[in-house]
Amino acid sequence: MGACEIASAPLMVLLGLFPQPVFGVALFALSSALGAAFNVQIMSVRQAIIPEHLFGRVQGAYRTVIWGGIPIGTLAGGALAGVVGLSTVIVLSGAASIVVAFVTYAVLRRHRAEIDAAFEIDAAVDIDTAVAGDGAET
């Protein structure tokens, strides 16, 4: 997950520096693919570490923050682009994303053992469920 974030962020800086359509499409597609890979992985981590009875609340809060921030960022970016230009805003956004990517990487690395343990527990539960479903004792 951290690698996806760290690889994706500089692509936005390059997008702002090289705004030609051919580069723009390629850089945006690659950045978006890395973002999608991160999103799939982080959802798996949330499912593994959040207790089932709290999952809906956590998911709701997460989506509220993410989707609620999009219009705010859009308005702020548009206003700033009107002053300094769109390419500058994209470069600044990419630079901020680089900082966020390294913070994300550090947080994930710090909690690596807990994340790994959560997936080991889920795997054990899945195996126990499969065995019990076959009529065998657990």
Image (cartoon, rainbow, N blue to C red):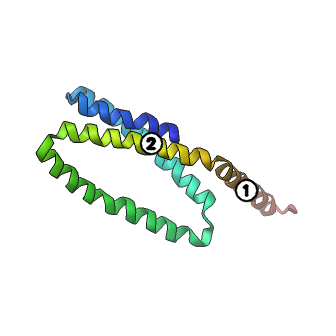
- Element type at mark 1: helix
Residue 124 percent across, percent down from the top left: 76, 55
Observer-nearest residue: 43 or 75? 75
Looking at the picture, which amino acid does disc 1 mark? Ile
Task: Please count the marks in the image.
Answer: 2
Query: Which of the numbered marks, if any, corresponds to residue 101?
Result: 2
Residue 50 percent across, percent down from the top left: 60, 63
- Element type at mark 2: helix
Query: Which of the numbered marks, if any, corresponds to residue 30?
Result: none
Are there few (<14), some (14-19), or many (20+) residues within 10 Å of tag 2?
many
Residue 138 percent across, percent down from the top left: 86, 62
Q: CA distance from mark 2 to mark 1?
A: 28 Å
Say if residue 40 shows up in the picture: yes
- In the shown orientation, is residue 89 left or right of residue 27? left
Q: Residue at x 35, y 33 (%)?
A: 11
- In the shown orientation, is residue 49 left or right of residue 93? right
Looking at the picture, which amino acid does disc 2 mark? Ala
Observer-nearest residue: 104 or 132? 104
- Name above or below for residue 104 compared with residue 22: below
Q: Residue at x 72, y 53 (%)?
A: 123
The image quarter containing residue 92 is top left
For label 1, the residue is 121
Say if residue 25 shows up in the picture: no
